[in-house]
Image (tube, rainbow, N blue to C red):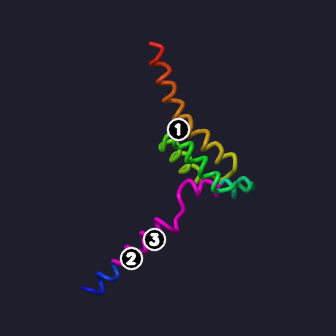
Amino acid sequence: MKKLLAVAVVLGLGAVVYAKVIRSSPETRACERINSLCGQKVEVGECREAFDEAEKILGEKVVDRATDCMDDADTCMEAVGCMAGATTHALEDFEKGFERSKR
């Protein structure tokens, strides 16, 4: 029983280390995806800062949609389209507010 508990603890710690340290954040993966698809060297730190700023302005939902989409992008333009498409959800909120203010 002690051996089983020890194995479970080691596996649990391994999963935590993988999730927190080894596996990069969605924003970092998106920045690296842009580098690989577009052939440009984007500074990952600056790119992450841009995603953080976008999250403050547009919201976490928009950034999550963009980064999830970019994970599956096959071309540079598709990755750019993911970013543009995700922002349309923020524009829908803008339109709701605009229409409400006109009443």
Picture coordinates of residue 9 (x, y %)? 34, 77
Disc 2 element? helix
Picture coordinates of residue 25 (x, y %)? 53, 58
Q: What stretch is highlighted in magenta?
A: 9-33
Tell me the amino acid under the disc marked 1: Leu
Main SS of residues in magenta: helix
Per the image, the residue denoted by label 3 is 17
Seen at 51% across and 27% down, the residue is: 94
**Camera-nearest residue between 54 and 99:** 54
Cα distance in 3D space between marks 1 and 3: 30 Å
Per the image, the residue denoted by label 2 is 11
Answer few, some or many: residues within 10 Å of disc 2's Cα (few below 14, many 20 plus, some between 14 and 19): few
**Camera-nearest residue between 83 and 27:** 27
Residue 64 is inside the magenta segment: no
**Camera-nearest residue between 12 and 38:** 12
Q: Are marks 1 and 3 in contact (CB under 8 Å)?
A: no
Tell me the amino acid under the disc marked 2: Leu
Disc 3 element? helix
Seen at 52% across and 35% down, the residue is: 89
Per the image, the residue denoted by label 1 is 58
Cα distance in 3D space between marks 1 and 2: 38 Å
Disc 1 element? helix
